[in-house]
Image (cartoon, helix red, strand yellow):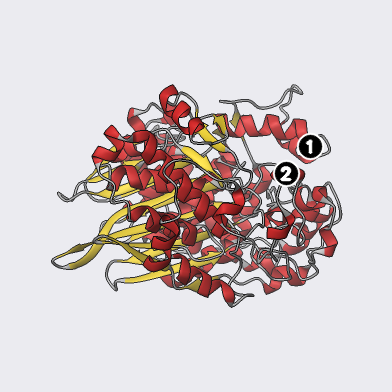
Amino acid sequence: MHQNGVRLYKTCSKMDRSRSFGTKADIQTVETKFKRRCKTHRVYRKLFTDNADQANKNVSHESSYKEFKSAAVVSNTGICSTIGKNILQEGGSLVDAAIATKLSLGVVSFQRAGIGGGFFMVYHDAKSKKDYFINAREVAPSAASVDLFKGDDYARKCGRSSIAVPGELQGYYEAHRRFGRLPWSRLFQPAIYLAENGFEMTRNCYNWSRVSMKRLPENKQLRDLLRKEDGTFLKTGDSVRRIRFAETLRTIATEGPDAFYRGSLTEYIMKDINDGFGRPSIITKNDLTRYRALVKRPVKFHLDDLTFITSGAPSGGPVLAHLLNILKGYRFTTDDWCNNKALTIHRMIEAIKFAYCKRSRLGDPEVNDEIDKLVEEMISEEYCNKVRSKIDDIQTHPPEYYGSDMTHVFDDHGTAHVGILGEDGSAISVTSSINKPFYSVIGQRTGIIFNNSISEFSNEKGVHGSQYKVVTKFTQHSNNLIEPGKRPMSSMSPTIILRKTPNGSSVRMVLGGAGGSHIISSSAQALVQRLWFKRNVNEAVKEKRIHHNWLPDTLFVQENTDEEIIDDLANRGHNIQIMNDQKSSVQIIEKLSDNKIVAKCDERRGGYPNGY
């Protein structure tokens, strides 16, 4: 049944392949023919799923881990993984598949993804052996300044004043222009289909909607989006349709990203933003027009015979590199995990605290030359050895022990990840964000859910919330203060890992995560479990986690962790708080030595892999 759906999907798109952007009439003709044929073959509404009843529900632990022969796609939502797989089978490139998957995620997982935000992408081309980092992070408007938000946390965090200039569409276009194969308009059809015909609300989306409606009663647009005809609100499993957003996507499919930044949608976008709740926005049409995605060299570092390719600053990639390089010197083995677990976890915690302290010095290298030098230091073996020598096996220490860089970095939220390994050995890892779910404007004309990424800039110099109990003399000027055109820091850290082979390097793993500041620590723990403790991918991702932000001085331990471990960590001086198991998720694809491909989606937040 599913193969018929794929074949029909391919047939109905032939007329679209000759255009960069099809006309609106062309796209509607394709969709009409496609729907008619699907109904005839009884595959309508099952097009994008291998198991329709599992498409939007929390899947079993078994289905979150799968094995494939040729290619694999992982994402936070199973139906979107299937869309990526279908694009690959249609002859699309990895970038085509990633864009189609992410656009669909922006429809279904609308609490944490969408074209109102931004992303980081790393891409390895197996044929050319070249690696790329695309930075489509949101930027501060041209009128932004520290004084503008001084003493006004609400303006920084909530509503229209918290919106930074979105970069997602411009980033997709830059990636497609360089590496795309199918027409741009073709990549939008699955997302348009889902938005028009409906999808089931996920548990995570429902949970966030309840929280945000309670915290922000003034966000009437959210209530309008979630209210059913009978006056009640959507809940897990209910069908969601986003008709206005489908029309917006159709316009962008037809006219390209210029429709958003300098075209037919721009005026509507500005009205949507200005009609939103909260303090007035400072975004202008010129801010949208001037936005550019950046194509840069990724950060590379080596562990044993592996080469890691990750995103550069202001992402979390350099912090992940720093953390793993600190831990490398312990030369962990399975014995450390089996026989010295408490000490091993303590060492990991201390390394995380040092890494997250260093993270507070990072910022946007496009506006501060110091950042590139700082990243070089963070991944240097000599510096990481020096940091490791400060780790005390007996006890933990107060925040100032880990460095004088006492500038708190605000937590980020609302992230979604996609990883793909292709038949030719190329790989792509991309993580996107709109930041805090439903804390910003929902466009009444366009259906776009906007970011609140202004909140990811640091506060003014020397100011910290009382909860952090920071000693003022250690405070330094933050490199993450808001400035016009600046990109805020993020924990997103998409990563690709290469292994050495007799024929040169080839992809071993594709990795990324969602969950704000927990992304870095969770990704590192999954990698330590797989690479050094020799757990398989399924076990590595399922293992219970810890997390420490350095500030505040609290160790988060996942619920149901062994009491003996918790007691041992408390005796070493850690201030422990139990966290639920949904704080973060990690997605991994690995190509084993026998060329079998294994893929794992973290059941903490649902989703399942797909491939062939």
Specify the farthest residue to the bottom.
Answer: 369
| Residue 451 appears left or right of 271 | left
Q: Quadrant of the C terminus?
A: top left
| Placement of 276 over or under 292, stated as above or below | above
Res. 439 mark: 2
Which residue shows up at 84% across the image and 48% down it? 278
The answer to which of 307 and 478 lies nearer the viewer is: 478
Name the residue rendered at 66%, 53% in the picture: 408
Question: Residue at horizontal 28%, vertical 66%?
Answer: 126
Q: Position of residue 500 (x, y in %)?
A: 21, 63
- Look at the picture and state if 171 lies above or below 99: below
Query: Please, which residue is most extreme toward the front here?
Result: 394
Percent position (x, y) of residue 594?
14, 49
Label 1 amino acid?
Leu
- Residue 563 position in % (x across, y down): 44, 22
- Quick one: SS at disc 1? loop
From the viewer's perspective, is 219 left or right of 394? right
Picture quadrant of residue 240: top right
Quarter holding residue 230: top right
Q: Are marks 1 and 2 in contact (CB under 8 Å)?
A: yes
Tag 2 secondary structure: loop
Judging by the rendered image, the residue that carries numbered circle 1 is 216
- Is residue 191 in view from this perspective? yes
Nearest to N terminus: mark 1 or mark 2: 1
Q: List x then y, in percent, for residue 246.
A: 62, 48
Closer to us: 261 or 161: 161
Position of residue 278 relative to residue 559, above or below, is below
Label 2 crowd bin: few (<14), some (14–19), many (20+), radius 10 Å: many
What kind of residue is marked 2? Tyr
The answer to whether 164 appears left or right of 358 in the picture is right
| Residue at 44% from the left image edge and 47% from the top image edge | 392
Count of numbered labels shown in the rendering: 2
